Structures are given as C-alpha cells and as structure tokens.
C-alpha cells in the first residue's frame, strides 16, 4: 500500500502540529518515522481525523479505503485489552473478520506461535501475563485480520533480546513473504537504522528530511544540528571521518568490526 | 547490619527460598531478562503482592499490621501502564503524595521547590503533563515517588523510554541522594542503567544467580538474553579479534586508541 500526504496540515488547540507537509510511504517497504509528532502521522493514517490537505491510499481517497486493512500496534495502555482471557480477546476481534470458526482457531494458534507463545496461553488470564507477553500477544492480535498496512509504535519496547529477535523476524517476513507495508514509530534511531528501508524525520511541524536509510544519514552534520540523535553506527562513522578514515557505511556492528579489523591489518602490513 | 531484607521468600511456583540483604545508602541494581521475575519481585517488595514477615525495612517486618507504616517509607516506580498520572498539571501531580500524608500547603510548596531545583524541573511545574515528551514524563514519575522522602526507592524498569541525557542526569541525582541515606533498588533489564550501582545482582529464573561488585561478566549476561550496549558489544568483538585488549565505554577513546 502506498500512502501520500499532499499539502497536509493538522492543528490541535489552534496550533499547527503539521503544516503543509508532503510525504510518501512506499508500498512493500519498512518506513520509519522519527520525531516528537510521529504518532500524529500514524493516527492520520489509521483513524478518521479532521485535517486540511489530501491523504491518498494507493491513489484513492480515504473514503474509498477500508480502514480495517490498517492495523496500528500501539504501546500498551489500560485499554489495550478489553476482555479477561487471551482466547476471549481473539474472539472479540473475530467480529470484524469473515471467517469460519474452525479455521479461526487454527489461525489463532498459528499467530500465537509466530510470536513465540504456545496454545496453552489461550486459557490464560491476561492480567497474569508479563509486559513482554502482553506486547507479543498484542502483535499476534493485530495481525490476525491480515492487514495490508501495519503501523507499530516502539517495536522493541518491553522486549529482551529474544523478544526483539522475534519481532524483527515478523517484520521482515511481513515485508518479504507477505508483501505488506510497514510503518515503524520510534525515538531510538538505532532501532530505525536496524529495521527500516526508508526514514521520515519530523521536526517542529515539518518534515526535516526523508529518504532511503542508506543515504539519509550521510548528511549527519545537518541532522545533528537539528537535534537528531545519530545511530551508534553513524556516530562511529562520523568519528572515523574526523580522523580522515573512510570505511564506508556499516549495515550492522559485525560489518563495522570487519571494516576496522581489515583496516588495522592493512596499516600493520604497510608499516 | 542490613537495612532492607527479604528472608526466605517462597511464592507459588516462582520464588523459592529467595534471600536478599541491602545496606542503607547503597545503590543496588538487579538485572534480568524477560520472565526472570523482576516485576513479581517489585510487587512483593512494594506490598502489592501480600507476604507475611518476609520483607523487613529498617525495623519494620512487613505484614498486615505494619503495611501502612511500611509503604510510607517506600517510593515505587514501575513501567506499568496502570501507573498513569492523576492530574493534568505537573505541580498537582507532585503535591498529591504530600496531600495524602496531610502536609500543609506551605510545606507542600516548600518541598516542591526543593525537589524541582534538585532535579532541574522548575520550568515545567505549571505545564500540562500531556504536553511533556515521554522522557520528561518518565523523569516526573521518579521525582514524584521521591517527594515524600522515602527510605527505599524501588525502580522497576523505570528508565525505559528515557533518553540518554535524562537517564545519566537522573542516575547521578539519585546516586547523590544515596549519600544522604536513600537506599535504591534498581530492578532493570538494561545495562545502561547500572553505571552508578554499588553492587549488581543477576536475576534469572527467579533466583539471584550472580553478584558483581566491580567487574561484570558480560559473556554470562549475554548468554541469559541481556542486550549489551553498543560500546560493550563493539569492544568485546574487537577484543576477540585481538585488535584491542579491554572494554572501552567511550567511542572517541576507542577510536583514539586504534589510530594514535
């Protein structure tokens, strides 16, 4: 699903939260959104809201679009779960999905399995789950309706390394195997650098910069001037560049380690 | 002598003969991954899960009769989403614990003044909490839990979603309070929060498996699913390749060492 904002403005209490912005979220990519007002973009896309300008979904107006195809995975709050047990919560969501009872149970079990929870969880009282289990359950619930667009706020929140690995794999699978479009909201530029293809950085009520994550951070000076916290890998690149050492871009920490190792070996041989 | 003590805690199928002793004025961290027992331990210490004569704070043994006295000496922050703010204005939120304890308005204002200077939040006292960014909101939760000057501060992943600058500032300020007698129990999943600790315990499967006074065994922590911060991960990998010979916590310093 491709989403376009044309000349969009949004106000709260007579103050512009977004002013005349244009942006594009590309189909079948993972797009990150960074900045204080990132949730507003998610709400504009997933709820019916009062704004000026145009939002297009696959070049269609919102009115022509089925909002059920959009799933917004928010942070946990008091109203995240409305029923008592895990099973109840899945059947509550069935109301929106046209599917046979017997098939639905299989679907529930496979989506629980995807987030690393077994079917024993169906009987569990949601109050007895830990925060990480609640978060993983919410992801399973949000994907059961097979949405076209998935928005996730702080994907790694509450999760340890294993949980992060599960979520990362789900996001990659949604994109690569199921050709979904994904939006990630985060204030942690390391997470965005790790997971996203494209990035949109908001500042004040404007888009500060947007584009491919591979090249967007090349202008790290401009971003730092605008209080964007650089990902650790970009910060490393910056410090190396200040010493006139250009090892290119690193996609992850192993890439960086390899670059440093090779460089150190070469300089050893030279001397 | 220990100031806070958990004595032979056994709870359902989780904790079994669990013991912990903390001295007054110490900053103690307990680190653990998901399902290690962190939140349950917090709930037991803060009397949300009732226990009988298992926890002792100073000379109060926590039970039905002493619970009010016990919790009045406690400050607790969790990342539980049920712990929302009660008021719109920062100042009202800070005043609330003191109102409950029957402080006069004059005394309340005095305390808010002292605390807001100490934590440098004078400029947000009249702001609407919803207008603050998430990092500042998390800061406010901790400050509110300290306003009645508790003896023991219990933090359950209280620094999640706090930015690095606020995190470092808050850790330093809290450490400063321990010099005046505050005891801190920082129950956490993040190694970034343990830097000011006098001692670090590792909680795994509802047991204290290790304790560190100085050097931390990162290999072990990594094994049990704790994420290592970028600098530690990078140092360990370069150390393994014999490019460097110790852990560097500062990137500039590491690059300086590699390219003298």
Image: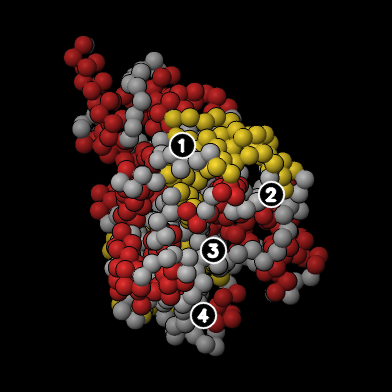
Q: Give the residue pinned by disc 3.
A: A77
Number of the label disc, if any, that sits on residue B60 = 4
Q: Residue at x 59, y 53 (%)?
A: A47
Q: Secondary structure at mark 3?
A: loop
Picture quadrant of residue B199: bottom left
Number of the label disc, if any, that sits on residue A232 = none
Q: Which of the two marks, 3 or 2, is nearer to us in this view?
A: 2
Q: Give the residue pinned by disc 1.
A: A26
**CA gap, disc 1 to disc 4?**
61 Å
Q: Which of the two marks, 4 or 2, is nearer to us in this view?
A: 2
**CA gap, disc 4 to disc 2?**
57 Å
Residue extending farthest to the right is B106
Asked if the residue under mark 4 is in contact with the one under mark 3, i.e. CB atoms within 8 Å, the reply is: no
**Chain ID at mark 2:** A
Label 2 packing within 10 angstroms: few (<14), some (14-19), many (20+): few
Q: Secondary structure at mark 2?
A: loop
| Percent x, y of residue A118 | 28, 68
Q: Residue at x 54, y 63 (%)?
A: A77
């Amino acid at each position: 699903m491709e989403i376009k904002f044309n000349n969009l403005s949004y106000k709260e209490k007579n103050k512009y939260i977004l002013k005349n912005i244009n942006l594009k979220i590309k189909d079948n990519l993972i797009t990150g959104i960074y900045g204080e007002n990132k949730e507003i973009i998610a709400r504009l896309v997933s709820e019916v809201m009062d704004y000026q300008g145009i939002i297009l979904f696959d070049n269609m107006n919102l009115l022509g679009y089925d909002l059920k195809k959009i799933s917004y995975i928010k942070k946990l709050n008091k109203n995240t779960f409305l029923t008592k047990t895990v099973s109840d919560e899945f059947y509550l969501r069935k109301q929106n999905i046209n599917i046979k009872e017997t098939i639905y149970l299989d679907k529930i079990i496979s989506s629980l399995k995807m987030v690393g929870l077994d079917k024993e969880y169906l009987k569990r009282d949601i109050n007895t789950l830990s925060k990480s289990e609640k978060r993983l359950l919410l992801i399973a619930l949000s994907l059961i309706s097979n949405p076209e667009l998935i928005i996730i706020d702080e994907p790694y929140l509450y999760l340890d390394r294993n949980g992060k690995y599960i979520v990362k794999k789900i996001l990659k699978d949604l994109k690569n195997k199921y050709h979904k479009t994904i939006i990630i909201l985060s204030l942690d530029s390391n997470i965005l650098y790790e997971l996203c293809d494209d990035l949109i950085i908001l500042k004040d009520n404007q888009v500060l910069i947007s584009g491919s994550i591979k090249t967007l951070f090349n202008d790290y000076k401009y971003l730092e001037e605008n209080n964007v916290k650089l990902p650790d890998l970009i910060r490393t690149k910056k410090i190396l560049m200040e010493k006139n050492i250009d090892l290119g871009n690193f996609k992850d920490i192993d890439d960086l380690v390899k670059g440093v190792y090779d460089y150190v070996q070469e300089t050893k041989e030279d001397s | 002598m220990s100031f806070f003590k958990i004595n032979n805690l056994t709870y359902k199928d989780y904790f079994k003969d669990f013991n912990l002793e903390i001295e007054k004025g110490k900053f103690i961290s307990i680190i653990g991954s998901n399902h290690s027992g962190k939140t349950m331990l917090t709930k037991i210490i803060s009397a949300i899960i009732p226990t009988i004569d298992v926890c002792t704070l100073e000379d109060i043994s926590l039970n039905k009769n002493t619970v009010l006295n016990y919790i009045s000496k406690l400050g607790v922050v969790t990342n539980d989403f049920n712990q929302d703010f009660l008021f719109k204005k920062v100042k009202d939120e800070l005043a609330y614990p003191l109102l409950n304890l029957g402080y006069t308005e004059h005394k309340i204002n005095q305390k808010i003044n002292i605390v807001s200077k100490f934590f440098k939040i004078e400029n947000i006292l009249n702001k609407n909490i919803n207008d603050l960014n998430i990092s500042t909101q998390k800061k406010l939760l901790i400050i509110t839990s300290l306003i009645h000057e508790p003896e023991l501060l219990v933090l359950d992943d209280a620094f999640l979603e706090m930015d690095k600058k606020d995190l470092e500032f808050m850790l330093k300020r809290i450490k400063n309070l321990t010099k005046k007698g505050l005891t801190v129990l920082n129950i956490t999943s993040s190694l970034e929060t343990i830097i000011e600790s006098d001692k670090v315990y590792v909680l795994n499967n509802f047991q204290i498996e290790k304790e560190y006074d100085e050097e931390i065994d990162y290999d072990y922590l990594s094994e049990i699913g704790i994420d290592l911060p970028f600098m530690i991960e990078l140092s360990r990998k370069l150390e393994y390749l014999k490019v460097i010979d110790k852990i560097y916590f500062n990137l500039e310093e590491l690059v300086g060492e590699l390219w003298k």
